[in-house]
Image (cartoon, helix red, strand yellow):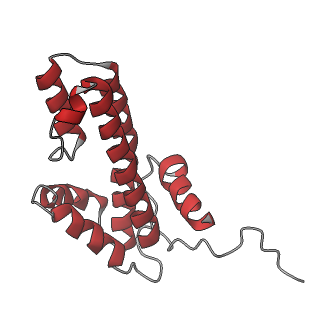
């Protein structure tokens, strides 16, 4: 459990806008699954609070992304509610750290972070996102130092004192 919280803290607090480090596969998977849960809850909250009783009689099963939820609420109700603002804020709060995490994960393979643009194109394909997540999680990073630094090693104590 400590490792999960450490990975989430590293992604969303410490390195939320840093693209010059490396990231492990476990950190990538943990943060991506957490983001999926947060966005799903945000979408459902937005739909429920915007539509009210109409939410229970409307088929919202095909709404999977925040953009689809925003479009659906605006076309159904005709107004921009405060819950849509909550959805937009949560979407950006999740998206920016995930882009930086993908950038750092690419550095772990020795690839440039600009390859994230190609990954975004692959994610347009249906189920392409799941393939990207699976690849980024399972691909082993460079074991030694590459041009982006040393591999991430959380198991080494930060308070090592050499015995003399």
Q: Residue at (35%, 72%) from the top-left corner?
A: 137
Most foreground residue, 57 or 69: 57
> Looking at the image, which residue sits at the far top?
79
User: Which residue is found at the position 48% from the left and 49% from the top?
Assistant: 12
Viewer can see residue 149: yes
- Measured along the vertical axis of the image, is residue 55 above or below residue 27? above
Q: Going 30% across and 39% down the picture, which residue do you hit?
A: 43
Image side of residue 126 versus residue 65, left or right: left
Residue 4, position in %: x, y?
54, 63
Q: Quadrant of the N terminus?
A: bottom right
Residue 3, given in percent of the width and then of the height, sits at 58, 67
Q: Quadrant of the C terminus?
A: bottom right
Q: Nearer the viewer, residue 152 or 149?
A: 152
Which residue is at the far right? 164
Could you say where residue 68 lies in the image, as x and y percent from the top left? Answer: 16, 38
Asked if residue 109 shows in the view, the reply is no
Residue at position x 57%, y 58% from top?
A: 5
């Amino acid at each position: 459990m400590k490792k999960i919280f450490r990975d989430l803290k590293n992604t969303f607090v410490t390195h939320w806008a840093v693209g010059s480090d490396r990231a492990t596969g476990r950190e990538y998977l943990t943060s991506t699954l957490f983001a999926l849960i947060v966005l799903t809850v945000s979408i459902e909250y937005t739909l429920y609070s915007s539509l009210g009783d109409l939410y229970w009689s409307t088929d919202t099963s095909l709404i999977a992304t925040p953009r689809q939820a925003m479009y659906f609420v605006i076309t159904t109700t005709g107004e921009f509610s405060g819950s849509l603002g909550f959805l937009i804020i949560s979407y950006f709060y999740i998206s920016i750290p995930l882009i930086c995490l993908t950038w750092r994960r690419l550095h772990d393979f020795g690839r440039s972070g600009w390859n994230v643009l190609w990954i975004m194109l692959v994610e347009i394909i249906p189920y392409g996102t799941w393939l990207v997540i699976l690849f980024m999680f399972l691909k082993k990073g460079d074991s030694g130092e590459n041009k982006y630094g040393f591999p991430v090693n959380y198991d080494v104590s930060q308070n090592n004192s050499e015995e003399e």
